[in-house]
Amino acid sequence: MKKTIRSNEEEVPLPSGAGNTPVVPLESFVPLKQLVFPSLAPRVHEFLRRHFPGADEKDWFNWKWQLSHSITSAAQLGRIVDLTEDELRAVSGEGGMLPLRITPYYASLLSKEDPHQPLRRCVVPVTAEHRRCFGEAEDPLHEEHDSPVPGLVHRYPDRVLFLATGFCSTYCRYCTRSRMVGDANRMHQFSTKVWDEAIAYIERTPAVRDVLISGGDPLTMPDSKIEYLLSRIRVIPHVEIIRIGTKVPVVMPQRITPKLVNMLKKYHPLFMSIHFTHPDEITPEVAQACMRLADAGIPLGAQTVLLKGINDDVPTMASLFHGLLKIRVRPYYLYQCDPILGSGHFRTTIEKGLEIIRGLRGHTSGYAVPQFVVDAPGGGGKIPLLPDYWQGRDTEYVYVKNYEDRVFRYPNIQHEFSR
């Protein structure tokens, strides 16, 4: 029986005494020129005419329409792209950990004919997902082992990961939490009761100064539920920073409405980590969404997963990171793909990641070079990796290599100076 996942849409009231920021008129936050998205591109007009003939421009820019009309079956997907025999078997068959879900917006970016197109490979299943390769596990990062209460991961001393939902608007086939978002029953465990238990843990743990709200994707929830979480967490005295981890601005930019942005702005300091994979994702709609967030004072960082045959070369990564900077998103992390079940066809070597960093460092601005990290299996956390710039030392100097492979020495003796 095919699994289905539904987004939980019920409204929730704000807690008493929370979110007490005074209401400010919309115009005070968002300039009027930002209240509309760019006009529909010709490709979108054609896409709507072919696949959603009853829809209009108003529907297209409505994020709830995007969710309710997402592609979730082989029949729907087969009308949009020419499925290969392998893709058709993967989409139609049972046994995959992760359901199919693609927003109409993101589906409009997919190549109809080319199954090797990077964006298509990221979201369309293939039968390789059913193969288990060396070192793979359902929960390789041991998140559940580091979960003191349901829905919360506390691995690092001063910060926690708050899993607010198991629902995403589009499922990336290499998702590190496919065990969670692929299970409808577990998704329904995410509720305000679970949230309140996690919030109570944060309240009684003063070492926690940083809370990352993720999932699933928290921006798929209604504004009221997002604000419920933010308001409850923001009033905890020892919580200094709140972060949101999301791919929604990339796969459903219509969700970044002026109303949402103005609500988020009340809970500063608020940061956002956005999952970007390929430069083809940086469209005018995505640029508009990121502009709204950045103009609201929300620092934006990008998290990218290194994927074989998709973005594992220097020109592609340079194009992505340069494009991100132009829309005010700072490349933050480049992740080695986690060894989740069925990810072997996506994973490349750590040496390839180091090669990419070596090809960026010194050849472009430092802002365009993310940290390359391995999230260590077994719950070891993120471990940064760098090319071998350190060449050694002697009694007076350390020796370092630059981006041109030239070796330099730096005086490394601490002298005492008399006053």
Image (cartoon, rainbow, N blue to C red):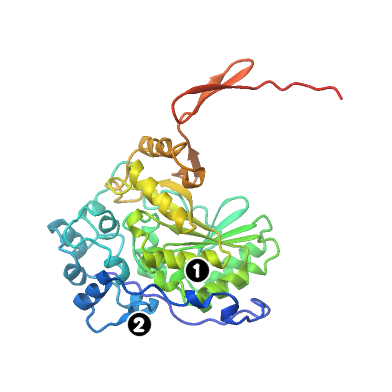
Amino acid under label 2? Lys
Distance in Å between CA atoms under marks 1 and 2: 19 Å
Q: Is residue 304 visible?
A: no
The one of 69 and 204 positioned closer to us in this rendering: 69
Pinpoint residue 268: horizontal percent, then vertical percent. 62, 66
Disc 2 on helix, strand or loop? helix
| Proximity of marks 1 and 2: CB atoms separated by less than 8 Å | no
Whether residue 357 is situated above or below residue 47 in the rendered picture: above
Q: Which residue is mark 1?
A: 292
Amino acid under label 1? Arg
The one of 392 and 376 positioned closer to us in this rendering: 392
Tell me the crowding category of disc 1: few under 14, some 14 to 19, or many 20 or more residues within 10 angstroms, Cα based. Answer: many
View extreme (bottom): residue:
54
Pinpoint residue 93: horizontal percent, then vertical percent. 19, 63
- Could you say which quadrant of the image residue 74 lies in? bottom left
* Residue under the point 32% across and 44% down: 347
**Which is nearer the N-term, disc 1 or disc 2?**
2
The one of 407 and 136 positioned closer to us in this rendering: 407
* Residue under the point 87% across and 25% down: 419
Side of 202 where 302 appears, left or right: left
Side of 19 where 407 appears, left or right: left
Q: Which residue is mark 2?
A: 58
